């Protein structure tokens, strides 16, 4: 009947062609996705990776060596040990040449830095400079790396050799 084709649901030739083209594109895209194993995501974007670097920064671009080392240290939990090694390794730069000439850092464990002074006078001097040294170290390597400083003076000679010894006053008249 001629009146049925002119109703509101009737389609014209151009509309039919557009719908057929859209259906063909969707079917082609679905077949291509099935062949490549890539599924179409909701919203029309595909889950494809770029295969080129492009003008912006990318993780695959060459990175500075220091950044890579710090990333590896953070991932493996080496950062506290590295900061400890920084304090011990850069001791003259951190405290100055004058102090570094007269004391040596022995260990840094649990925030306590142990220093070996070359004389009792320098041990006393380091104990009085303790707050200034803590402030310098906190500024250089960060807070809470060094929380306490323990100064050890020089030790006298020991006459103990080996695992066994005899109690007593030691060699009394040896030097006289």
Image: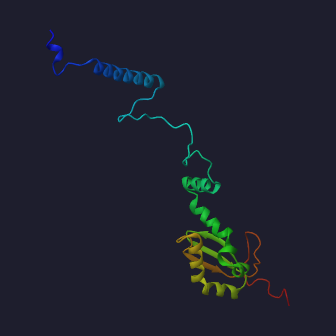
Whether 11 is drawn above or below 47: the answer is above
Residue 87 position, x and y percent, is: 63, 70
Chosen colour scheme: rainbow
Whether 34 is drawn above or below 145: the answer is above
* The C terminus - image quarter: bottom right
Residue 56 position, x and y percent, is: 54, 48
Residue at 71 percent across and 82 percent down: it is 98
Residue 47 left/right relative to 103: left
Nearest the eye: 121 or 50 = 50
Nearest the eye: 10 or 59 = 10
Whether 113 is drawn above or below 56: the answer is below
Residue 38 left/right relative to 149: left
Residue 157 position, x and y percent, is: 76, 80
Residue 11 position, x and y percent, is: 23, 19
Residue at 44 percent across and 35 percent down: it is 47
Residue at 56 percent across and 39 percent down: it is 52
Residue 109 left/right relative to 19: right
Residue 29 left/right relative to 117: left
| Res. 60 image quadrant | top right
**Among all residues in the image, which is located at the extreme right?**
176
């Amino acid at each position: 009947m001629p009146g049925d084709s002119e109703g509101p649901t009737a389609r014209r030739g151009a509309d039919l062609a557009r719908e057929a083209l859209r259906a063909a594109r969707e079917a082609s895209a679905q077949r291509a996705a099935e062949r490549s194993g890539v599924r179409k995501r909701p919203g029309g974007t595909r889950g494809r990776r770029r295969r080129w670097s492009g003008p912006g920064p990318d993780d695959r671009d060459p990175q500075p060596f220091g950044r890579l080392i710090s990333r590896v240290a953070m991932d493996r939990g080496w950062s506290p040990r590295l900061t400890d090694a920084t304090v011990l390794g850069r001791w003259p730069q951190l405290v100055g040449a004058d102090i570094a000439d007269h004391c040596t850092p022995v260990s840094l464990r649990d925030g306590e830095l142990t220093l070996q002074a070359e004389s009792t006078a320098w041990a006393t001097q380091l104990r009085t400079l303790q707050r200034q040294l803590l402030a310098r170290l906190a500024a250089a390597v960060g807070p809470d790396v060094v929380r306490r400083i323990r100064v050890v003076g020089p030790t006298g000679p020991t006459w103990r050799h080996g695992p066994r010894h005899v109690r007593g006053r030691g060699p009394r008249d040896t030097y006289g």
